[in-house]
Amino acid sequence: MNVTRRGDAASKTMSRMNLDELHTKLIAAARADAPADRVPYAFEKRVSALLASRVAPHALDAWVTGLWRAAVSCVGVAALCGMLAVITSASSAASSDDLVQNLDSTLLASVDQTDQAQ
């Protein structure tokens, strides 16, 4: 097993190393160096402030679920209105001239009334 690409001295040393002895030495060194009991200044307050500043995710779950349901229902209503518009436009294609005439007469009705009043 080579540690380096070219198989230099490090790879040869690795093959002669006793891994059990190395493991024992590392565990002994870790046990000899006990962790410090000193805590940084105001550590608890900083952690508590960070926890308090976060929004609870379960409070937003209801909003997210409701908004997704509303979005899905809006897509359904839009598709239904689109199909209804296509169906009604296909059936009333012959009467589209009447619709244009009715729109013109409705929009110009106020102009006609002001002309008659003068």
Image: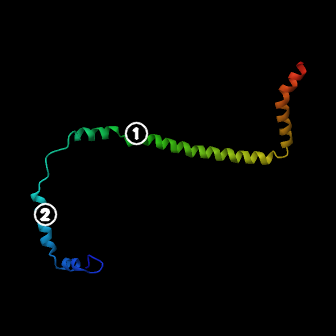
In this picture, residue 71 sits left or right of residue 53: right
Could you tell me residue 6's position as x and y percent? 29, 80
Q: Residue furthest top?
A: 118
Secondary structure state at the residue bearing disc 1 = helix
- Give the Cα separation between the discs numbered 1 and 2: 46 Å
Name the residue nearer the viewer: 27 or 97.
Answer: 27
Q: Quadrant of residue 9?
A: bottom left
In this picture, residue 48 sits left or right of residue 89: left
Name the residue nearer the viewer: 110 or 97.
Answer: 110
The residue that mark 1 highlights is 59
Q: Amino acid at mark 1?
A: Ala
The residue that mark 2 highlights is 27
By what rule are the colours in the image chosen?
rainbow
Name the residue nearer the viewer: 106 or 1.
Answer: 1
For image coordinates 9% across by 58% down, the residue present is 32
Could you tell me residue 111's position as x and y percent? 85, 26
Q: Amino acid at mark 2?
A: Ile
Marks 1,2: beta carbons within 8 A? no
Could you tell me residue 96's position as x and y percent? 83, 43
From the viewer's perspective, is residue 25 above or below residue 5? above
For image coordinates 80% across by 47% down, the residue present is 91
Secondary structure state at the residue bearing disc 2 = helix
Mark 1: give few (<14), some (14-19) or many (20+) Cα within 10 Å.
Answer: few
